Image (tube, grey):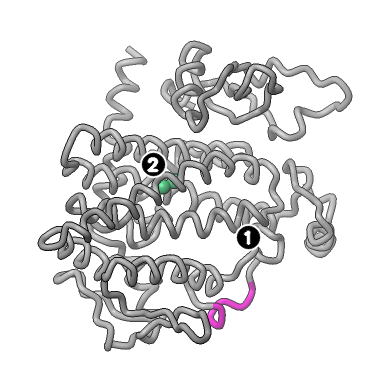
């Protein structure tokens, strides 16, 4: 390692250099890449038990097939991210099976229970949209060749998840009555989760190695805006209320509350008027949501039992 | 590495149509070739492949470079 300095590597990357192996990296680059891949792998992995919790509410064998196909895709995506981490010398057995659950880096939204079919499809439309927003930016811009190539498969499958979510949201909304109410209630708590998905605003996060080394192309605020420009018009079309609207004159989407906002974990509602600080948000993220331990446990609980069978 | 995560890395190659060239599509870790075939087929199911094959990474022979296969990352001694 270290055949380049950070400045040299950044310059080469800006000129189009693609990093292919550890020998091309600096320590800073490698650390930033490992951080990015860990968030990616953990988010994909924990989406599986989260979606599975709601998939048990699938209304038919057909819908169960499409829900479990999505879960299978997510496990595959997690596998790909962890495989890339292994190539960087990361002990993924530790990450998967020994790491304390609170150290998993999935967003707060995936620490929450998904209670029914309407919540599953809304998650597909909102959270998988967040995934596509982040990963398609990485795919377009990343300087790490192995990741760029691996994301071709992931992108194809994520688009299927998104379509599944949007088609089903529409079906439930068009049915009206209880179906529409369930979608509205799901969007009420999931929309601000999605807004928060993209992390700290740009004015709070000045230096960013992921941008310097082109591990991604867009800033947090740019990614958040891209996501809102897809999600808000969808909700407007469906007649689902969101605390944001499209401004027809500017073509922009405007949030109707001031970030960040407080989350009431008991009633599971956002307090849109209660302005808090980003430090408070950090605290909430660090304290984790109600399903954190259970979701992590669900992907590891049988590991050591089967291991002992094989060793016998 | 334990029994479940497997001791070997397998590189996965596939082509979509019979006239396509075989391309590297991914990597899987498995304890043996039979499981590597199963894992590869289940995990990389984004296309209806005409053909898919797996090969252990450690079987790669470098032709013109001294180090390990360049784009596949370092082989770990396991
Ligand atoms: Fe995914
Ligand atoms: Fe997905």
Mark 2 or 1, nearer chain start: 2
Q: Is residue B69 visible?
A: yes
Q: Which mark is drawn over residue A98?
A: 2
Quarter where residue A273 is shown: bottom left
Q: Position of residue A156 (x, y in %)?
A: 51, 42
The residue beneath circle 1 is A216
Quadrant that contains the C terminus of chain A = top left
Of badges 2 and 1, the one in the foreground is 1
Is the residue B34 above or below the residue A8 in the image? above
Q: Residue at x 38, y 39 (%)?
A: A97
Tell me the chain of label 1: A
Instruction: Judge left or right: residue A192 versus residue A220.
Output: left
Instruction: Judge left or right: residue A47 versus residue A62.
Output: right
Q: Residue at x 59, y 58 (%)?
A: A137
In front here: A55 or A24? A55
Disc 2: CA contacts within 10 A as few (<14), some (14-19) or many (>=20): few
C-alpha separation, residue under disc 2 versus residue under disc 1: 29 Å
Q: Are marks 2 and 1 in contact (CB under 8 Å)?
A: no
Is the residue A199 above or below the residue A52 in the image? below
What is the total number of numbered labels drawn onto the structure image?
2
> Which residues are the magenta region?
A202-207
As helix, strand or loop, the secondary structure at mark 2 comes to helix
Is residue B48 inside the magenta stretch?
no
Tell me the chain of label 2: A
Q: Position of residue A241 (x, y in %)?
A: 27, 74
As helix, strand or loop, the secondary structure at mark 1 comes to loop
In front here: A299 or A59? A59
């Amino acid at each position: 390692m270290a055949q380049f300095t950070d400045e040299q590597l950044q310059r080469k990357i800006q000129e189009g250099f693609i990093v292919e192996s550890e020998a091309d990296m600096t320590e800073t680059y490698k650390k930033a890449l490992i951080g990015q891949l860990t968030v990616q792998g953990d988010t994909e992995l924990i989406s599986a038990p989260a979606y599975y919790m709601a998939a048990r509410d699938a209304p038919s064998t057909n819908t169960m097939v499409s829900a479990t196909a999505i879960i299978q895709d997510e496990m595959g995506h997690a596998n790909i991210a962890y495989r890339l981490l292994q190539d960087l010398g990361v002990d993924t057995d530790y990450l998967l099976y020994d790491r304390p659950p609170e150290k998993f880096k999935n967003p707060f939204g995936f620490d929450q229970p998904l209670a029914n079919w309407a919540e599953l499809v809304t998650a597909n439309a909102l959270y998988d949209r967040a995934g596509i927003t982040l990963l398609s930016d990485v795919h377009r811009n990343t300087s790490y060749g192995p990741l760029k190539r691996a994301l071709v498969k992931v992108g194809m499958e994520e688009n299927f998840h998104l379509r599944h979510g949007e088609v089903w949201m529409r079906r439930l909304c068009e049915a009206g009555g209880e179906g529409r109410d369930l979608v509205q209630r799901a969007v009420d708590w999931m929309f601000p989760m999605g807004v928060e998905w993209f992390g700290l605003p740009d004015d709070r996060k000045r230096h960013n190695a992921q941008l310097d080394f082109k591990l991604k192309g867009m800033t947090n605020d740019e990614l958040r805006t891209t996501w809102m420009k897809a999600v808000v018009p969808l909700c407007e079309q469906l007649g689902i209320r969101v605390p944001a609207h499209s401004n027809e004159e500017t073509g922009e989407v405007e949030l109707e509350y001031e970030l960040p906002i407080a989350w009431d974990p008991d009633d599971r509602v956002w307090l849109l008027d209660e302005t808090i600080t980003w430090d408070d948000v950090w605290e909430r993220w660090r304290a984790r949501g109600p399903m954190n331990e259970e979701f992590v446990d669900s992907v590891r609980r049988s590991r050591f039992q089967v291991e002992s069978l094989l060793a016998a | 590495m334990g029994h479940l995560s497997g001791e070997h890395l397998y590189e996965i190659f596939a082509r979509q149509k019979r006239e396509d060239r075989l391309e590297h599509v991914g990597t899987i870790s498995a304890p043996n070739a039979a499981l590597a075939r199963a894992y590869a087929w289940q995990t990389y199911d984004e296309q209806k492949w005409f053909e898919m094959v797996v090969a252990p990474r450690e079987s790669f022979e470098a032709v013109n470079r001294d180090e390990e296969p360049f784009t596949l990352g370092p082989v770990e001694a396991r």
